Image (cartoon, helix red, strand yellow):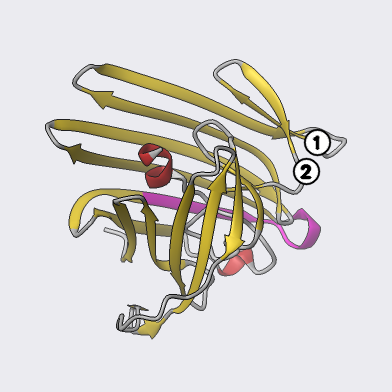
Amino acid sequence: ATASALLALGWFAAAGAASLPARVHYDVLDGDKLVGHLDITLETSGEGAEQSLVAKQHGEITVRRMLIKATIRQTIEEHWQNGRLLSLTADTSSELPVGSTRKSLSVTRDPSGALRATSDGKTHDLPADTLPLTLWSGRTLVAGPHFGLAEAELIEIEKGETAADDEPPVRYQGEECRRRDFEAVNDAKKKSVVAAWIGSDDIVCKLRMSAGSDVFTYVRQSPP
């Protein structure tokens, strides 16, 4: 669950995609400790109904719990046209002292519009309006059905209440970012609380995800 929470990132294309930057970069923190990075490249082409976007990302984190250390890596490639997901592939691996695991995922939309996911050789259909759980893009942080990027498990995003706190404003490159609050609930009814601060370009400046005692934060940085 922690691996999915940490690396369930991607992007969602919509009108105005030409304004997206070519590269987006995040530091990942476990509590207040830097544990990894996420790097995303965005390629756009065409106009109008022919507008297409390709997103390629690589994330790597190393987390420690008690005496156990786990390194988790994920690569994702997404293809969109006119704001609609055409296909997605993802490869997720983890290394632990007791061994390593690897999961592969492929999601495709057929000509009828149906969305099908294949994870480790098993295929299942997804609701046609399901979005990938793309937490870096403000365009995907909307209520409704989503799927995780490790096994395409269904996750419902619900609007949450903004907590009353004394947090200072979040800024990226001097610009103040607006806050949104959500809850993410999976099929097992496990809940994560998400607070996101989003810039004027609809890209997340900061995202904090709390699940039980785990708190992970993504902070947007200028690409290295």
Identified at 40% across, 84% down, the residue is 176
Q: Residue at x 41, y 59 (%)?
A: 24
Please state the total of marks drawn on the protein image.
2
Relative placement, left or right, of 149 versus 84 is: left
Above/below status of 60 relative to 145: above
Residue at the far left in the pictured view? 67
Q: Nearer the viewer, residue 68 or 130?
A: 68
Q: Is residue 40 magenta?
A: yes
The amino acid beneath tag 1 is Ala
Q: Nearer the viewer, residue 47 or 161?
A: 161
Q: Residues within 10 Å of mark 2 (few under 14, many from 20)?
A: few
**Residue matched to label 1:** 114
Find disc 2 in the rendering and name its residue.
Answer: 128
Q: Earlier in the sequence, mark 2 or mark 1?
A: 1
* Residue 116, picture quadrant: top right
**x%, y% of residue 28?**
29, 53
Residue 49 covered by magenta stretch: yes
Q: Is residue 120 above or below residue 164?
A: above
Is residue 163 shown above or below 147? below
Bounds of the magenta segment? 39-50
Residue 115 placement, left or right of 202: right
Residue placed at 87% from the left, 36% from the top? 112
